[in-house]
Amino acid sequence: MNDIVELMNERGWVCLSDNKEQTTLTFQGPLEAAGHAIKCESGTGQVWYGKVDKDGIALLTRSDLLPKKGEI
């Protein structure tokens, strides 16, 4: 498991799946609002972005794998 998952576990998130490109997390505790954006920086400096869905699940994607502005 990577360091972003360990960081999120400290905040009440539990890892559902994890690979080098995406991490799926589910929130355990007070449910954050659906659509709430998440930005995390791992211990290695890698930035991850994602959003919480209505079930409290967030899919985080590495920032370097997201489409750049103008590519969509």
Image: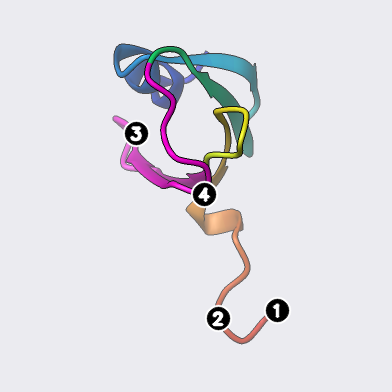
Dot 3: within a 10 Å radius of its alpha carbon, few (fewer than 14), some, or many (20 or more) residues?
Answer: some
Total label count?
4
Q: Position of residue 10 (x, y in %)?
A: 30, 13
Q: Position of residue 39 (x, y in %)?
A: 37, 46
Q: Which residues are magenta?
A: 30-51
Q: Quadrant of residue 61?
A: top right
Residue under numbered circle 3: 42
CB under 8 Å between callouts 2 and 1? yes
Q: Is residue 10 above or below residue 36?
A: above
Please, what is the three-letter code of the amino acid marked with disc 3? Answer: Ser
Residue extending furthest toward the right: 72
Which numbered marker is on residue 72?
1
Please, what is the three-letter code of the amino acid marked with disc 4? Answer: Gly
Residue appearing at x 44%, y 40% in the figure: 33
Residue appearing at x 53%, y 39% in the figure: 52
| 37 is within the stretch colored magenta | yes
Q: Is residue 57 above or below residue 7?
A: below
Q: Is residue 32 above or below residue 72?
A: above
Residue appearing at x 41%, y 26% in the figure: 4
| 20 is within the stretch colored magenta | no
Q: Is residue 36 left or right of residue 62?
A: left
